[in-house]
Image: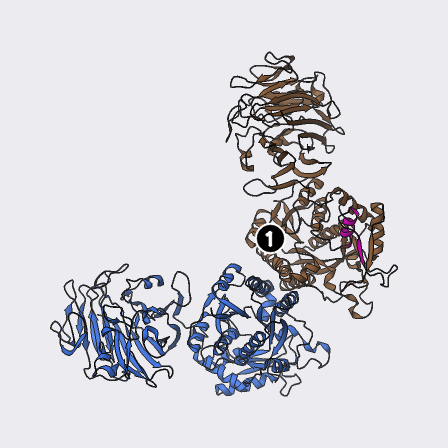
Chain colours: A blue, B brown
Amino acid sequence: MSEYILVTGGAGYIGSHTVVELINNGHKVVVVDNLVNSSYDSIARVEFIVKQSIPFFNIDLRDHDKLSEVFKAYKIKGVIHFAALKAVGESTKIPLDYYDNNVNGTISLLNVLKEHNVKTIVFSSSATVYGDVTRFGDDRYIPIPEECPLDPTNPYGRTKFVVEGILKDIHTSDPDNWKVAILRYFNPIGAHPSGLIGEDPLGIPNNLLPYLSQVAIGRRDKLSIFGNDYKSHDGTPIRDYIHVVDLAKGHIAALNYLHKLNESGLYREWNLGTGKGSTVFDIYHAFSKAVGKQLPYEVVGRRAGDVLDLTANPSRANKELGWKAELDIETACEDLWRWTTKNTHGFNVEGYSWKTFESDGNYGNRLHTFVNGDLTVALANHGALIQDINFDGDHIVNAYDNGDDYLLKSNPFFGTTVGRVANRIANGQFELNGKTYNLPKNENQNTLHGGLVGYDKENFLGPIVKKEKDVFIVEFLLVDPDGKNNFPGDVENIVRYFIDNKSIKIEYEARLLNDKVDATIINITNHSYFNLSGDATTDDTVVKLSYDNYLEVDAKTLLPTGNVIKHDRVDANKPITLSEDTFYDYCFVVDNDADAIDTRSHELKKVFEATHPRSHTKFVVSTTEPTYQFYTGVGVNTKGFVARSGFCVEPGRFVDAINNKKWAPQVILKKGEVYGSIIQYDLSKV
Amino acid sequence: MSEYILVTGGAGYIGSHTVVELINNGHKVVVVDNLVNSSYDSIARVEFIVKQSIPFFNIDLRDHDKLSEVFKAYKIKGVIHFAALKAVGESTKIPLDYYDNNVNGTISLLNVLKEHNVKTIVFSSSATVYGDVTRFGDDRYIPIPEECPLDPTNPYGRTKFVVEGILKDIHTSDPDNWKVAILRYFNPIGAHPSGLIGEDPLGIPNNLLPYLSQVAIGRRDKLSIFGNDYKSHDGTPIRDYIHVVDLAKGHIAALNYLHKLNESGLYREWNLGTGKGSTVFDIYHAFSKAVGKQLPYEVVGRRAGDVLDLTANPSRANKELGWKAELDIETACEDLWRWTTKNTHGFNVEGYSWKTFESDGNYGNRLHTFVNGDLTVALANHGALIQDINFDGDHIVNAYDNGDDYLLKSNPFFGTTVGRVANRIANGQFELNGKTYNLPKNENQNTLHGGLVGYDKENFLGPIVKKEKDVFIVEFLLVDPDGKNNFPGDVENIVRYFIDNKSIKIEYEARLLNDKVDATIINITNHSYFNLSGDATTDDTVVKLSYDNYLEVDAKTLLPTGNVIKHDRVDANKPITLSEDTFYDYCFVVDNDADAIDTRSHELKKVFEATHPRSHTKFVVSTTEPTYQFYTGVGVNTKGFVARSGFCVEPGRFVDAINNKKWAPQVILKKGEVYGSIIQYDLSKV
């Protein structure tokens, strides 16, 4: 059984960055967060950064029983405890909430730890516990060492002080077993260099750099500088700003230090700071430089409680933990600016919302809804599937209304991404670079749609959602590991949806992640069932297929014979009215000479059109792909849906291409190359 | 709607004494206690002391919803918050439990207070928060003033310190509304002068006097004196011992101070101490004097953490609260010794146990079980009733198995105490001292068994339980107020059961409490239904009545004619076998010339005997009373019981005595006199 690090408050600013570093350092992580002051999107993005899923539970630490369930489900070897309210000003207004969340939350956590005999904890404390270190009347505690007496001056700081005391008493009560690291942060700044995660303060930011970054993007007018008559080089107060990635790494160092203690316990405090003070103006200039222009500011009077210098003496952490802050404020400012410009409203994207989708409320499969004018699209992590396309009030795809039903055996691939190799592979067998691969046969003698656990049965990571020029860009990620369904190679798959107010473009992108194999095979498509009728079946839909040649198949095996011939019941662009008597399940050919693994630069060709007299919706499919399967859904028989309840148009590569010398290059993805394709759905009313 | 003071931890040592003082000062009180370290018996005894019932809820403060219900049911105007774990030594071993109970419990309480807009709180803190006041290297903080910096040296003290900080922060957040009194106790000693309540430590006592008292009664060998080489007059350390009653009064003073603030808020700390230090030997000698002999002791080495002098400077409380400790250590020692000798095992009495009896779990009506050899008796507060008499395995009284059923309309007075006036009062009317009283008529034209809400429908206070020479003495109390059921005068009623291993003696005692009236009328008895058959009816029981004269009654009104005549179907001491055909409901006369209001000094005469061939149980009733009603239960028709399921033998005064000039003195209770009577049940096997 794997051992996990539990990160409480892992969806927050420092928490999320620490989760990245934990995973980068080979730890497995479980995150618990009540999301009252953070966003799950940060975890979805961390998953993207680390390319793996992270168990997440929306739990308040004060919920003893739910928290205990996590410890029953995962073997926890240690805890990094961030979860807390953290705004100094707010804490003076609602102190009871601070004590309840921060102190009571910790007591509850510690009760659960004790019950499950987990006695290693890294606690997220704060330099705030030192209080005003100038109170001694001299410089004896500047820069501040851990030995400095504690005297927090606000309820927030007192909650941290109280929790340090509780942890100390607990350690004293059982000194051989409890391993407690107290990390006292100075001023965390910056963001992950990926630009995917960063600080996302609610309301008016309390801290200098978040405020400055909102000035830079125009959300705030100007920066107020509280006093320029301090005894620093430029008159503004000195603080110890530390890059959040450095800070995150400090937690890994502390955790490793505790784990190396083996049989002995410990209670120890460490400052996490740079030891180098920067003034407000130093930060202002560094950030203005990152932005590329001088930002508006105004010097106003001193703020009550501010003091000249709060710089850390980090030498204890440097020496004992072998940790040192390495990133300078310039880097932090650049990283912050990247995060800010890529996420002007933090994790919030207008028109985008999500909810959990399965009855157990797991965060692995959520339903994401995008509203863009007349078009609303819903996508789920499971298979990165399309759960809804609602155009001007008409729902045009078959779907279940809950995530559980997508797990039904009778689910005919509703809306899902199909891969690693869509359609059939003859006898579940192929040769590649002289090696024969035998796949699980899940349809008679053949392998269909990727085998037993195809992409349609996986929860994709993400999505990362952006909105650029009124287009949602929604990116899902799936790492399909080497050997899964017996396919060779670790393949990273990106499914990218572009949603405007009348079209959905799907872009598939895949690559081998490493050197395990030289090549693999791939063919991805979407398996939506369309229905423009607003009724139980697609009868009376008028369709036009742009191409009428198709892959002839053996009547018995349903596998291509290798011949491309004209379909006897299809004429290009000639209307066909669907009815009880029409049956199609054929692969029509757009480009008989296709051999590209990445078709994205090819012409986007219209291949299919459909309208229905009842809804007046016109639905057009275009693609860069060389074929498209047209299927009238005669085999559908699942909860709420009958035969012909939807038709499929699935652009992709030639069926069983790998087993045909001429077609094979379409599906062979070599190391260093990129697989790519585009499918587009256009909607209008006629 | 009355306004209440909520006392958390009100069943504890200081809490229970404070409840007494609150009520003595005219406050109404609700008590909440989780009883983990205290006994509900203390509240039962407080009720005895103050002669009124006190709403009690067994609730852990951390149970937000249950606690909130109390605030919905009672209008709370302020809180005195005692509830906490309090053993210093234990706190170092299980600190998390201390933080959870004391800090988390307070946070939960404060959340509920805030929700119900109750912002007046007196907090039970401790001088422990000051820590070692000798740490300053001089005497500047001896005696200790409230300004002394805080530095508790153990988890218990830190929980008090943390809660003080929380209360301070909450006051700061809303300074106009929160009224917070912090009371820092020095060393509480002594007990209530009634001997009914006192300190009842679990396990080995941590404190000097409880330990010494256990030495005095032989539960501990000898006192250890930790060091006699301190710089005091006798070499032992100096502490500030304060009588618990003085301490309790300090809470009233603080509460009144807060209430007088009217529209302004406050956060203020007050020491509750005497300002006078006593050494360990001072206390030893005072207590030895109270006991009347020198107690064994041994001087051993100093104890880690002990310091010379921890005496309060109580002048702030003296001046601001107008409160001053008034009782000396000699008084405290005498009170403690009284409590100890009367309660050698604290609230615990061997063979006695209780449980709540009604489905809502209220503490007003509990079921009390007494096991004494072959005899087990169960009594409930409701009507001070007899719920079970189990002799050698045979249950001999009719009873319901739960408290709820006793509230059934069909309940024929099972086991209950009947009063204020048992049996009938003709036309619900009587004259007394020239005044005519009209009572509610609850049986045709008459008043039966005290009227609409007789003693049988009241929960008696208590019981106080003692065991002396293998006899349980169980005392219930009911104050029947002036005007209740239209009877004149506040009457205090005591029902006292004496239970040995083969008999139950019931003693009734009643008196007018004050000067409201010069006289009232009274006649109390017990209405148990006996059944020796072990079967549904009493058929085949052989009974002998010692007296065969009875009060002749008018056939229509069932009221006495005034004649005492021989019963035609009864001969003294001649066996009668009960059957379907036997019916008795007559008042037999023991003493035709009776005129005493207190018969307890009269001869206890055997009046009735019964045996049954199946159980071989012999049941004898004796009494000091002048009559006894014998009733064969033909009217019984209630849940689980049919006609003749039990017979009654109810000694008492003449029926409707008040309306017969000759008989009236039996039932007229005058101011300054005491009503009294005795009934005894003897059991044996034949």
Q: Position of residue B474 (x, y in %)?
A: 68, 36
| Location of residue B416 in the rendering, given as x and y in whole percent from the top left corner | 61, 31
Q: Who is closer to the viewer here, B225 or A594?
A: B225
A60 part of magenta stretch: no
Observer-nearest residue: B311 or A18? A18
Q: Nearer the viewer, residue A356 or A169?
A: A169
Residue A136 can be seen, yes or no: yes
Q: Helix, strand, or loop for circle 1?
A: loop
Note whether B336 is above or below A205 in the view shown. above
| B163 with respect to A385 (left or right) | right
Residue B552: percent from the left, percent from the top? 62, 14
Membership of B231 in magenta stretch: yes
Name of the residue lying farthest toward the right? B233
Is residue B521 visible to us here? no
Report the quarter where the N terminus of chain B lies: top right
Residue A622 placement: quadrant: bottom left
> Which residue, given by chain and number where applicable, does mark 1 sit on?
B60
B577 or A87, which is in the foreground? B577
Residue beneath the point at 62% across and 87% down = A234
Instruction: Magenta stretch: give its range.
Output: B208-234
Q: Position of residue B601 (x, y in %)?
A: 75, 25
Callout 1: chain = B
